[in-house]
Image (tube, rainbow, N blue to C red):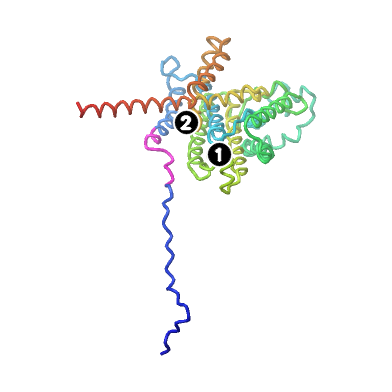
């Protein structure tokens, strides 16, 4: 056996590498137990209670839900979907859009084209072409009406048309790193330009009158109480589905990156993340949600015209989110109901003061309630909890 060579260095045996375990934060639940309870109650109100009160409770009863009430609630639920879409880009990503009325109107126009084709020969001119085309002496449908007679294609285009426009616009805007007030102004300019385009008769979109006099959807009369209730229930389900989707989105890693972009975009870039795909994707998702809201809005209201693209409508969406509370999801829904409920009441009782009320409401929320109604409720709850704890501490001392 050879003796060890003292001149040859010896090395200790390799120690196994030990990597300390890092506990990653658990993904929060989609909704708390109380949240699921509220969600279930809302689902029952939309799918069970409202149909019963409207279709089976006699009109003379105090519990009867009138057709006007059904149409009003359905319209406000469409606005609530837009408020949710605004919260995803403004509240969670820090992108203030003043042009989301365009995506809402595009979804409405896609659905309106299908409804106009459903009229068939029941129009005033008894032609296969829509009445406004006959009046303008059109001989055939323009190319962009090619798929308007298919309900399946219409449903797809409700999402694809607003999404495609948002994708093209957003890509160039975000790639150029346009942000803040400049981005808001550009979105408003885009919406205004589209409104001027749709006012022109040669676009084949009805000009300043738009689309109206709808009669059927899927071959069923649109004016029957049962069809109106079906549209109401579908709108409620769409709102609840968008809310759950939003909750899932913001609780994911994707949602945390969006909030990081909102708080410090430069730090996100230094951390190795490219903000462009995140901002562009949430921008497109938000536009598609507004397109869905517009498609549900048109058959319930019975008309779509370029005025839906006005700057005031897009600004109102931001007001709904601000009044309810940004970055809360439930806040914008509440804001849409509060503002539009007040609008419906004031436009009847005091129509000349409605715009003053809207402006004063937005200023008051900005100055005194920066976190909206939801933030005020949270403060009140914290105040009650603090008062209870103080009383509990004084009790044993006494």
Disc nearest the viewer among 1 and 2: 1
Most foreground residue, 382 or 326: 382
Residue 359 image offset from top left, x and y in percent: 56, 17
Most foreground residue, 48 or 270: 270
Q: Does residue 212 sit above or below 259 in this rendering? A: above
The residue that label 1 is drawn on is: 264
Residue 137 image offset from top left, x and y in percent: 80, 24
Say what secondary structure mark 2 lies in.
helix
* Residue 223: mark in rendering: none
Say what secondary structure mark 1 lies in.
loop
Tell me which segment is drawn in magenta.
26-37
Distance from label 1 to label 2 (Cα)?
24 Å
Q: Is residue 33 magenta?
A: yes
Most foreground residue, 366 or 122: 366
Residue 182 image offset from top left, x and y in percent: 66, 30
User: CB under 8 Å between callouts 1 and 2?
Assistant: no
The residue under the point 57% across, 13% down is: 356
Let me know if residue 105 appears in the view. Answer: no
The residue under the point 55% across, 39% down is: 264
The residue that label 2 is drawn on is: 330
Residue 104 image offset from top left, x and y in percent: 62, 30
The residue under the point 53% across, 44% down is: 254
The residue under the point 40% across, 36% down is: 36
Most foreground residue, 221 or 379: 379
Let me know if residue 209 appears in the view. Answer: yes
Check disc 1: other Cα within 10 Å, few if <14, some if 14-19, many if 20+: few
Q: Give the side of residue 169 with respect to residue 366, left or right.
A: right
Most distant residue in the bottom direction: 1
Count of marks, rendered view:
2
Most distant residue in the front direction: 7
Residue 196 lies in quadrant: top right
């Amino acid at each position: 056996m050879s003796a060890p060579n003292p001149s040859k260095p010896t090395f200790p045996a390799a120690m196994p590498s030990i990597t300390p375990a890092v506990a990653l934060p658990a993904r929060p639940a989609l909704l708390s137990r109380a949240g699921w309870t509220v969600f279930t109650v809302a689902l029952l109100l939309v799918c069970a209670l409202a149909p019963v009160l409207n279709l089976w409770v006699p009109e003379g009863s105090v519990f009867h839900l009138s057709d006007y009430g059904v149409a009003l609630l359905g319209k406000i639920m469409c606005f609530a979907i837009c408020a949710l879409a605004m919260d995803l880009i403004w509240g969670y990503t820090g992108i203030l859009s003043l042009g989301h009325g365009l995506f809402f109107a595009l979804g409405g126009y896609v659905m309106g084209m299908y409804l106009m084709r459903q009229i068939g020969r029941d129009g005033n001119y008894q032609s296969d072409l829509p009445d406004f085309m006959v009046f303008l002496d059109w001989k055939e449908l323009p190319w962009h009406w090619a798929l308007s007679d298919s309900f399946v294609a219409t449903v797809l285009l409700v999402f694809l048309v607003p999404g495609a426009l948002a994708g093209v616009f957003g890509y160039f805007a975000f790639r150029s790193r346009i942000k803040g007030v400049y981005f808001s102004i550009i979105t408003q300019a885009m919406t205004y330009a589209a409104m001027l385009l749709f006012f022109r008769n040669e676009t084949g979109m009805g000009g300043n009158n738009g689309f109206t006099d709808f009669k059927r959807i899927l071959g069923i009369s649109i004016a029957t109480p049962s069809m109106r209730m079906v549209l109401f229930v579908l709108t409620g389900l769409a709102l609840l589905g968008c809310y759950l989707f939003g909750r899932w989105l913001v609780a994911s890693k994707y949602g945390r990156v969006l909030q990081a972009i909102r708080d410090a975009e430069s730090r996100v870039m230094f951390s190795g993340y490219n903000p462009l795909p995140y901002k562009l994707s949430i921008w497109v998702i938000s536009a598609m949600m507004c397109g869905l809201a517009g498609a549900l809005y048109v058959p319930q209201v019975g008309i779509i015209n370029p005025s839906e693209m006005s700057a005031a409508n897009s600004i109102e969406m931001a007001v709904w989110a601000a009044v309810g509370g940004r970055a809360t999801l439930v806040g914008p829904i509440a804001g849409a109901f509060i503002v539009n409920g007040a609008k419906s009441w004031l436009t009847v009782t005091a129509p000349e003061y409605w715009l003053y009320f809207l402006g004063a409401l937005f200023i008051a929320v900005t100055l005194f309630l920066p976190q909206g109604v939801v933030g005020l409720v949270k403060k009140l709850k914290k105040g009650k909890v603090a008062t209870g704890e103080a009383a509990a501490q004084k009790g044993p001392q006494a």
